[in-house]
Amino acid sequence: MGYPHKPHPKETVVLSKHFGEADARSYKGWVKRGGYEMLKQALTMEPAKVIDVVKESGLRGRGGAGFPTGLKWSFMPKEKKKPHYLCVNADESEPGTFKDREIMRWTPHALLEGAAIAAHAIQAEVTYIYIRGEFTEPWTIMERALGEASAAGVFGGMKVHLHRGAGAYICGEETALMNSIEGKRGNPRIKPPFPAAAGVFGMPTTINNVETLAAVPHILKHGAAWYKGLSLASPKSTGTKLFSICGHVAKPGNYEVTMGFPLKDLLYDLAGGMRPGRTLKACIPGGSSVPILNREETESCLLDYEGVVEKGSMLGSGGVIVLDDTTDMVYQIMRLARFYAHESCAQCTQCREGTAWTTKILERILSGQGKTADLDLLLDLADNMTGKTICVLSDSCAAPVVSGIKKFRNEFEDYIAGRRKPVMVA
Amino acid sequence: MSVGTHETPPAGTEEYQPVFTGEMLERLQDVFSRYPTKQAALLPALWMVQQARGWISDRSMAEVAEVLGITPAYVKGVVTFYTMYHQHPVGRYFVQVCTTSPCNVCGAEAVARALLEATGAKELGATSPDGKWTVIEVECLGACGFATPLLVNDDFIESVTPDKVPELVRKYT
Amino acid sequence: MADDIVNLTIDGVAVSVPKGTLVIEAAKQAGVLVPHYCYHPGLPVAGVCRMCLVDIEKAPKLQIACATQVAEGMVVHTQSPQAKKGRMGVLELLLINHPLDCPICDQAGECELQDFTFQEGRPATRYSPDYPKRFNPVEDFGPDVLYVPNRCILCTRCVRFMEDVAKEPVLNVSERGDRAYIGIHPEARLDHPWAGNVVDLCPVGSLLSKDFLHKARAWELDKTASVCTGCSQGCNVTLDTRDDVVTRVRPRPNRDVNRYFICDHGRMNYRWLNRGDRIEAPLVRRGGELHATDWDEACERVATVLRGAGGTAVSLVSPRASTEALFLARELFAGLDWTGAFQVVMGEEAPLAGVPNLALRAERAPNGRGAELLGYSRDYAAALAAAERAAVVLVLDEPDVALKTAGVVIYAGTVLPERARDAVVVLPIANVAEEDGTFVNRDGRVQRYFQAKPAPGMARPAWWVLSELIAALGRADRLASAAQAFDRMAAAVEPFRGLAYAELGFGGKPTAAGALVPA
């Protein structure tokens, strides 16, 4: 179960530097690599100073929304009147994304150190690391690392606990995650109140993604200016980012590049390009929730928050799903819709009913029974499912449907017109 | 709490034996100490029940409710939200195969079919006649770059292809 | 204070509301009902049905009116094309799995799914008949509640009521996505003393009362404001009658008394209002037997008795009698040495945990406080002892009267218990559903109830009967209404002074007496 590839020369290896080194998982091994030095330093700093450095670095949330991390931290009450909490989002459940898993598998202490620095910055005495239930191996590794670090006393008076999810995509949404920690159904909450005002257990809370926190020690070590300098295109996107690339590529895996890196290079150089004899058809660049890019858009896309938006999609979590010319787009979009229908928490009407209905329409089209009007219906349904619910799960279901029909309409029409052999849908 | 293996329970014992006694209760007390409310221990407590019993019966939900000072109905609402909690007994080896798009395009459905064939389970979700295997399709396991990943109980196995399935099944039986 | 008032515009209507008000509530003040399902003013906001989508200027997308607080200068459009499309989309989605079985649904006619679909839904569905609809069997949730999951729109009002108001979370949302339904643990029952409220809260025909099941169509029911007679809390209720039969009791909102709720004891306590064994004509004793007669003779007979009476008089009254009747039952004996008393059936107290000062009270009578304010004693035994030597005893609708007296018994009641057959005169009176009147609840709040159906035969409201008797004695003018009776009392009895019947409205007013101080 080794790390599948050696760093490519075009990679900027920061977070993934020690991926594949079994020894780095131990506390000793981590300290040998300079680990926990930055935590020690941070603990001597005023919390506000730590926040300033992170603000200055331009670090943005790596979970999907890309919200500036330092700014998020600064929303926490300065004057402490109630307990503060830090929740680490290790629920990584966005299809196409598997970077946090690697961070936890190989560098558990990097996460613990980053989390402890964040906890200090927001004055949180308790940190919960919420790990999705399916991540059995990362759990075991994190549990061991946490035990060692606690025994070594690196957290001072701060408490860090692991909390295991139990199979719910939506728990990656920060308010759902907090409900799940509280022992509730993982239902997203309406905002306001925002977590910094009333989060987990009703107390001021910050939720950060694993990769975001893992970057923090590096920012402290090399300085905000260094991190800010890691930017190939938009100055609003800084640092390095782990991109998970999967699907129809020769070398799927995680690759760490500087923000603004060309998607084309990630795809053809780092990930080894398409499988032999195949060509690129489409790409979902930011996890399954974002609009699909066609070949041309993919090959001209720069990988940062602004660059992907420019192409009509989103950077999201950095999960790049590559689809070659063998892909049945209708079938895969149906699979995505089915995923969201399965994962809908059932709160909002548009999501609960809309995701399931969308799936049924797509299944019927695949079975050769579709009607021409189905496409307009899907688009109108997608409109009703976009921007009208508590969280963005229903928007996420709509995104691939809308972009799929827009960019691959002929494939839908082929099924409807009977030009394509119907697919038996289980 | 640690990730353990699921033990299949002995068939239909009439009298309910509580899970949270002795060492298990001590472990739960330790879990309580991590949260400001007892209710927050619900997910960990349910994991403990599932590890001990292989699944979570209505009676177990009532026990958890009692220990945590919440209602059985509340517990049931939570159990049914999270797909990894079994509300029915499952085979000794519970296999979760990811068939979401990224794995799907890499042949995950063929892996699922191969698993059914190799285990003798008639269909997805049904336990094999020997009671050993239950195979289900699940949504994304978070290892899309290692298609097709699957979980056998708590063993996470990557890059499974249909041709590797018979050997994999043999290893467990 | 101006700082606490926010000015905004809703559909072109300017409104000023307190800071913190939700847009959906502010809209009511502008005369706009924003369609909604999950929102209920008596429950915590859930924001899940997404039905109340409105367009707010400068907001990037549609907002839900139930979870958005007003802001100074806010401009809200509930009828913009986007808002209407958003809501139409929700309605369409709520109906795709709905069985559309309105003809056999108890809720039909008072169903918010029907109403809002009628108001702004799509003329036809786009959900293909090829697609199966979700199906789950009907479940028996508790003593009076059935759950019809196929009609459920998952608004979670019932779940939130049990969790946040009753504080006994026996209902849950089970499963996820379109497989979700309202669940209950197999070992649990929806048998909380206030559980019946989930039926009222359910905006569709998903939670049904077994008691009311298939009893009436909503449009056949006449609704009358009343006050529950189940205990001394004085919950405001609506009596639903069909063809002059009370078929259902439902809570009527009153922020100061019962919010939006009533307990199951009160809800089920209506069958006596429909009793068939009523006294339908005045009876007078002639030759050792009671004979039916007219009101003139009956009144004259009582007047004759009273004109000749000296010494002591005793009134044994029901704490279910109207304040007006209780007042007049005292006035009737002005000039005599009078004792009045009542007895109260006691039961178990059952509070609604999430609402302060709301409970099914141990004292199972609506007007004990009123009786007290009018000088009636709780020392029933002493009154019975006094009655033994009394010249006249008036029994006012007290069926459980263990009376021994050497004097004359006048019985005014709805039914004729065996022990009252010794009376010289029996006067048929209306029950609470058949008259107007007031009760004073335990907190000293006087509240009106209204006539919901006619009294049987010649039965008349007790205030009328007593007023006739007083007039026959030539002591005061006849009263024409409960209002007049009340106003006469307000002029005469201190705690009621300053109150006017017409000003009590539907919500009642506090008397000067304040809350009951337990002895």
Image (cartoon, rainbow, N blue to C red):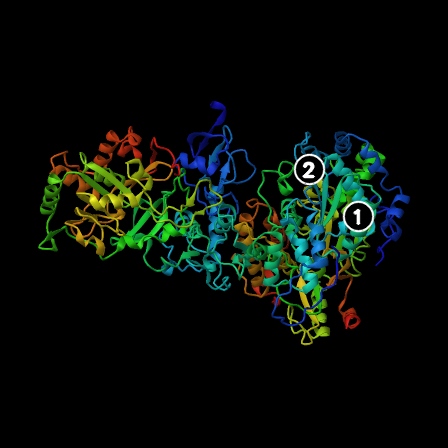
Residue B65, position as x, y percentages in the image = 60, 55
Labels 1, 2: one chain: yes
Q: Position of residue A144 (x, y in %)?
A: 81, 52
Amino acid under disc 2: His
Where disc 1 sits, the SS reads helix
Q: Where is residue C38? Give x, y as percent.
A: 48, 47
Q: How crowded is the residue under tag 2: few (<14 C-alpha within 10 Å), some, or many (20+)?
A: many
**In the picture provided, is A234 more to the left or to the right than C459?**
right
Question: Looking at the picture, how far across and down is residue C396, in whole percent?
Answer: 23, 46
Q: Which mark is residue A362?
A: none
Q: Residues within 10 Å of mark 1 (few under 14, many from 20)?
A: many
Quadrant of the image containing the C terminus of chain C = top left
- Residue positioned 25% across, 54% down in the render: C243
Q: Amino acid at mark 1?
A: Leu
View extreme (right): residue: A32
Report whether C343 appears left or right of C58. left
Residue A166 visible, this orientation = no
Q: Report, in whole angstroms, how far the alpha carbon at label 1 lies from the one at label 2.
A: 20 Å
Chain that bears disc 1: A
Is residue B5 or residue B115 the one in the foreground? B5
- Is C356 above or below relative to A181? above
Name which residue lies at 64% across and 49% down: B38
Depth check: give the residue in front, A244 or C23. C23
Q: Is residue A89 above or below residue C149?
A: above
Res. A414 in view: yes
The residue that mark 2 highlights is A84
Residue, disc 1: A146
Relative side of C479 to A21, left or right: left
Q: Residue at horizontal 66%, vertical 71%?
A: B127
Query: Which comes before the other along the chain, label 1 or label 2?
Result: 2
Q: Chain of mark 2?
A: A
Helix, strand or loop for disc 2: loop
